[in-house]
Amino acid sequence: MSSYTQIFYQIVFGTKYRLPTIDRKYDKELYKYIYGITKEKECKLYRINGIEDHIHIFTDLHPSVSLSDFVKDIKVASNLWMKDSGMFPLFNAWQIGYGAFTYSIREKDKIINYVKKQKEHHKDKETFYDEYKRLLIESGVPFDEKYLL
């Protein structure tokens, strides 16, 4: 018998100290690289986007892949790739930790659109800190604010 799942995750993580080190000139290259990792893990990437200090990944996970291993693999591999590529000279590392939020099939298109419009969303609107805190609150995730800084 096969395993069947339908769990959509919005995974969010930032750069170390939330520094603006993801150069917009090359962010699409970073997203393509992460897409490759996702595909290799047999997961489906629905949308990826972000701004200079964080990214959002909207995906599902293959039943054989754990969320923590998936995020760790993306962060470790993309960290090395970003440093080796020469495209992100200011990039130091990803933050420790991440946020992962689940959604139903009914919310899929809404979240794809939300991730798609990240640059527009953050232009003169909400900071990453405020957005991340809002996502945690909306999802009912308990957190200690001192770890959000």
Image: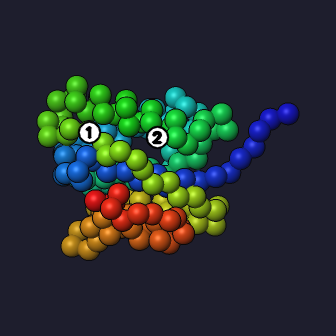
Identify the residue at horizontal 54%, vertical 53% (top origin). 9
Q: Which mark is residue 71?
A: 2
Q: Which residue is at the front of the view, 71 or 33?
A: 71
Circles 2 and 1 in contact, beta carbons < 8 Å: no
The quadrant of the image that shows the C terminus is bottom left
Q: Amino acid at mark 1?
A: Ala
Q: Position of residue 146 (x, y in %)?
A: 33, 62
Give above or below for 36 relative to 143.
above
Q: Residue furthest top?
A: 84
Q: Position of residue 3 (x, y in %)?
A: 77, 39
Look at 23% across and 68% down and name the residue there: 123
Q: Secondary structure at mark 2?
A: helix
Image spot of residue 56 (x, y percent): 40, 53
Q: Is residue 44 visible?
A: no
- For the residues labelled 2 and 1, the Cα–Cα distance comes to 14 Å
Question: Is residue 37 visible to us here?
Answer: yes
Q: Which mark is residue 36?
A: none
- Residue at the (80%, 35%) spot, across then down: 2
- Say what amino acid the circle numbered 2 marks: Val
Say if 45 sits above or below 104 in the image. Answer: above
Q: Which residue is mark 1?
A: 93
Q: Earlier in the sequence, mark 2 or mark 1?
A: 2
- In the depicted view, which residue is nearer to us: 139 or 147? 147
Looking at the figure, which quarter contains the N terminus?
top right
Residue sticking out furthest to the left: 89
